[in-house]
Amino acid sequence: MNTRNKALTITGSIMLVIAAVLFMVGGYLAGWDFAAYFRSQSFVWLCVLVGLYVLVAAAVIVRDKIKEL
């Protein structure tokens, strides 16, 4: 994997974690009921989007590994 893709993957993962933490802190400050949020449709969509990102990142890594062969 070339350094551009590796840096993009690492940076994207770090930014995703930071965004999730800031989202949770913002929700806490706004007085959200976290138990209800984790059972809501919004949380399901958040998990779907995070899962899609992980799948795409994994596909890019696997594609680069196959090209190196």
Image (cartoon, grey):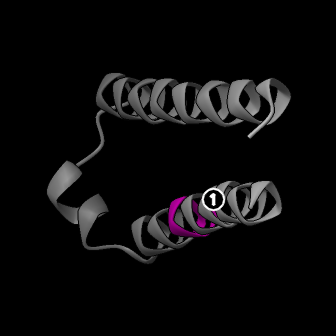
- At 39% from the left and 27% from the top, the residue drawn is 21
Residue sitting nearer the eye, 25 or 48: 48
In the displayed structure, 28 sits above or below 57; it is above
Residue 59 sits in quarter: bottom right
Q: From this view, report whether residue 47 is shown above or below residue 16.
A: below
Q: Give the camera-side residue of 43 and 66.
A: 66
Question: Which residue appears farthest toward the front when viewing the image?
Answer: 69
Badge 1 crowding class, 10 Å Cα cut-off, few under 14, some 14 to 19, many 20 or more, is some
Q: At 82% across and 61% down in the image, what residue appears?
A: 67
Which residue is pictured at 69% across the width and 31% down the height? Answer: 6
Q: Would you say 11 lies left or right of 35 here?
A: right
Q: Residue at x 78, y 54 (%)?
A: 68
Quick one: quadrant of the C terminus? bottom right
Examine the structure image and report whether residue 50 is included in the region drawn in magenta. Answer: yes
What count of labels does the image hold? 1
Which region of the structure is painted magenta? 49-53
Can you give x and y, in whole percent of width and height, for residue 65 in the image?
Answer: 69, 57
The majority secondary structure of the magenta stretch comes to helix
Q: Check disc 1 and report its element: helix, strand or loop.
A: helix
Quarter holding residue 11: top right
* Placement of the N terminus among the 4 image quadrants: top right
Q: Nearer the viewer, residue 41 or 33?
A: 41
Query: Image height check: is 17 above or below 54?
Result: above
Residue named by callout 1: 53
Q: Is residue 36 left or right of residue 66?
A: left
Image coordinates of residue 61 in percent, x first then y, are 66, 54
Residue 57: image location, x then y, percent: 65, 55
Amino acid carrying label 1: it is Tyr
